[in-house]
Amino acid sequence: MQKLGLNELRERYLKFFEGKGHLRLPSFSLIPQNDPSLLLINSGMAPLKPYFTGKEEPPRRRVTTCQKCIRTPDIENVGKTARHGTFFEMLGNFSFGDYFKKEAIPWAWEFVTQELKMPVDRLWVSIYEEDDEAFEIWNKDVGVPAERIVRMGKKDNFWEHGTGPCGPCSEIYFDRGVEKGCGKPDCKVGCDCDRFIEFWNLVFTQFNKDEDGNYTRLPNPNIDTGMGLERLACIMQDVDNLFEVDTVRNVLDYVCKTAGVKYHESEKKDISIRVITDHIRSTTMMVSDGVIPSNEGRGYVLRRLLRRAARHGKLLGINKPFLYDIAMVVINESKEAYPELEEKRKYIQDVIKNEEEKFELTIDQGLIILSKYIEETKAKNSKTITGEMAFELHGTYGFPIDLTREIAEESGLSVDEEGFREEMEKHRKIAKEDYLKKQGSAWSDDIYSTLDKNIKTEFLGYSENAAEAKVMYIIKNDQVAESATEGDEVILILDRTPFYAESGGQVGDKGVIESEEVKIKVEDCKKTEDGKYLHYGVVEKGNVKVGASVKAAIDAKRRMAIARNHTTTHLLQKALKNVLGDHVHQAGSLVEPDRLRFDFAHFTAMTPEEIAKVEKEVNDKILESIMVETMELPIDEAKRLGATALFGEKYGSIVRVVKIGDYSMEFCGGTHLKATSQAGFIKIVSESGVAAGVRRIEALTGEAALAYLHDREKLISDISTALKTSPQDSVKRIESIMTELKNAQKEIEQLRSKLVSSSLDEVLSKAIDVNGVKVVKARFDQLDMEALRNTGDTIRNKLGSGLVVLGSGYEGKVSFVVMATKDVVSKGIHSGNIIREVAKIAGGGGGGRPDMAQAGGKDISKLDEALDYSVKVVEAQLK
């Protein structure tokens, strides 16, 4: 059996199925599209759900992919064993109602025996126990001996996901030899030992399961296969685990080189080496697909993996950022299959390094909090750090649970990991339920899934503001209706429309749909996955029926304002790249008629100079009046021309490209200007942070920008009028007033000090004796807290021996200060305890040291009563 590298195996598989009429699709992003049921893509078929459910039309009935996948349920075991990993690649060939078992089974056998030349006598097959059809094909058509075909139950060989499409499975196993087995006489396919490896699963989706648990045959059954690329490479390279596979081993060796250690010399170090090797593969791929570290969702998965890897680097003695460097090896090993890795090399490196540096800063804070939790736990005579504490450490300081566990164990404590998981699950459920409420489940049926999938809306809005159309569907009160009348809220689906449906950050159009008999005011437009445009509106006049001929017209002025902002967004992205660097890419946008919002990847706040530079560059391009062209191109050609794709977005084989001269070229389905000069000009009104590594610019163009400048102009005029000067002299006048104010405040403080000083002798003369201790109590409403403390110091020094109790109602705020000389402290006086009782009278609280304390209060009317009460508190302390 030939030893084939992982990259060659991937290419051989995809080429083989291309030869069987399959369309090779690139790996989908790890970020699921329109599927809130998943945080990250975890199987080859996951991104193809819309094709299997019929919600979307596949580009071809036969498809083959190598899909990047992330699975994290066993993350705690990664490193401890050589079996577990979080990142893997899944090979798959799929049929959407085209071929079935009679083709899928022989092709699988042909690939493994003829293309890969696996020895036939080491191959075994499993089938679902009731699937006689699969048995006949394997046995009679392919020629696998009956004794090598193992029937298994529903648990092992039947795939289903709640209700919906499901079906039996057939798996192919490789026998690694008796020496890899458990030695039991009944060791066979299905045994948990390392002898028989299942490497290819063929799923025959031939049933639909309803709510009552009934299975009915699908009229057009599907094929869904999955073969782990790393697992296949283990077999072909005759190695024991994924860490020994060529491309993965190259990463592992570089980890060892960086840490100055050797693999297989220390089991403890081997765990750390494996953790880093696996996690850097996952994180590199996730960052490449647009995931950014955060404390929730997929961003938290990324953060957890990066910080877990960083921690294991510390265990190996690496005390500086290093993961960003190892990521380069991952990129080099996989860039041919995933060219986006090379395209985003610097960006990937920047994100990972930034997160490593952040962890360096937060780990010390987290250790302080954990030390506090350990002390609190011991003080309660408990042996367990609570789940809430562990969750707080993870949520606020990014502490992986295993780091908390390890430090706790060093102090003889354990961690309530079940409680931690409950807190995690509670947090996850809240976030997921909130998302599902907004989005709905990817597998669930809705009103639109019941409509004729062949009916689509022809979009005319790139060139037309109005169009004659036919009403295909009316939806009223969440039900399909035949008609609607005045006052009804409706959703209309037309056969053709000029209305742009909300997409790509651009809001939907508004306008009217009307005829002689009816008028519908349209407030928004969205679209379904299968291409139906949904016009949300209210019937203002008449009665509308299915089949009616109508005229659909958009609000053209509003559309123009949107186009100004959208085209300017493209200019803005290019200018940001030019000013800040190539790592900048779009992380989100909102294009409305009155403003634009652009989120982009960048790690620090922009300086005023950078903002001004970006704004100037965009305005220069607007003034150049560059022509804006749109074209539809095959995606590969568009990429060759240098068109920029949106991070993580899913595109078809033909893409729409918006080109602004030689300055900008992006994939985009939005509506745009004909020339940049139509934007008027841009005014950036704010720049802020919205997430880790993501900044946001808000800006205005056209009439909105003019209105903004007019408002600012009026504000300056009003300010100068109030200052009784001209606009150009306003700054000088403000500076002059501030100087005068500062001098006046200084003079007031001096007068206040003199006033207080002149009254100190009188205050001291009123000192009273309480059990041998001189007590001075006084009220100074003209002093703030700082001045009150200073005055207390002065009185204490003049007093020589005794206690000072002062209060103030400065600007309506109650303040107290208590100070004692050292000799009276030795007699039992404690300023902190005195002030606590005194402040209570005025509805406040505070505390401090025996010799000095301060407090606040709420009720100024109780201030004198509180000061008088201080004498009783002192008496109690001196008893």
Image (cartoon, rainbow, N blue to C red):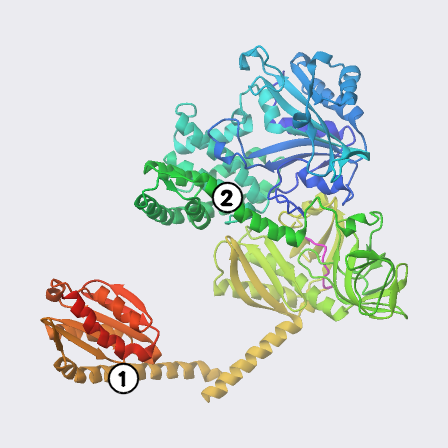
Any magenta on residue 669?
Answer: yes
Q: Is label 1 in a helix, a strand or a loop?
A: helix
Where does the image place residue 102, in percent across and percent down from the top left?
80, 24
Where does the image place residue 653, in percent across and percent down from the top left?
74, 44
* Residue linked to disc 1: 747
The circle on residue 565 is none
Furthest-top residue in this view? 185
Where does the image place residue 410, in percent across and percent down from the top left?
33, 36
Q: Quadrant of residue 311?
A: top left
Residue 642 appears in the figure: yes
Q: Nearer the viewer, residue 505 or 792?
A: 792
Q: Nearer the viewer, residue 584 or 767?
A: 767
Classify residue 604 as left or right of residue 289.
Answer: left
* Residue linked to disc 2: 422
Classify residue 771 as left or right of residue 644.
Answer: left
Q: Quadrant of the C terminus?
A: bottom left
Look at 27% across and 66% down and name the residue there: 836
Determine whether 3 is above or below 783 in the image. Answer: above
Instruction: Give the magenta-colored segment's residue range.
Output: 667-674
Q: Label 2 crowding class (10 Å Cα cut-off): few <14, some 14-19, many 20+?
A: some
Where does the image place residue 609, in percent across and percent down from the top left?
49, 64
Determine whether 11 is above or below 867 in the image. Answer: above
Residue 292 appears in the figure: no
Q: Quadrant of the N terminus?
A: top right
Classify residue 19 as left or right of residue 791.
Answer: right
Alpha carbon of mark 2 to alpha carbon of mark 1: how far?
62 Å
Look at 55% across and 47% down and name the residue there: 428
Q: Amino acid at mark 2?
A: Glu
Q: Is label 2 in a helix, a strand or a loop?
A: helix
Q: Main secondary structure of the magenta part?
A: loop
Classify residue 456 as left or right of residue 248.
Answer: right
Q: Label 1 crowding class (10 Å Cα cut-off): few <14, some 14-19, many 20+?
A: few
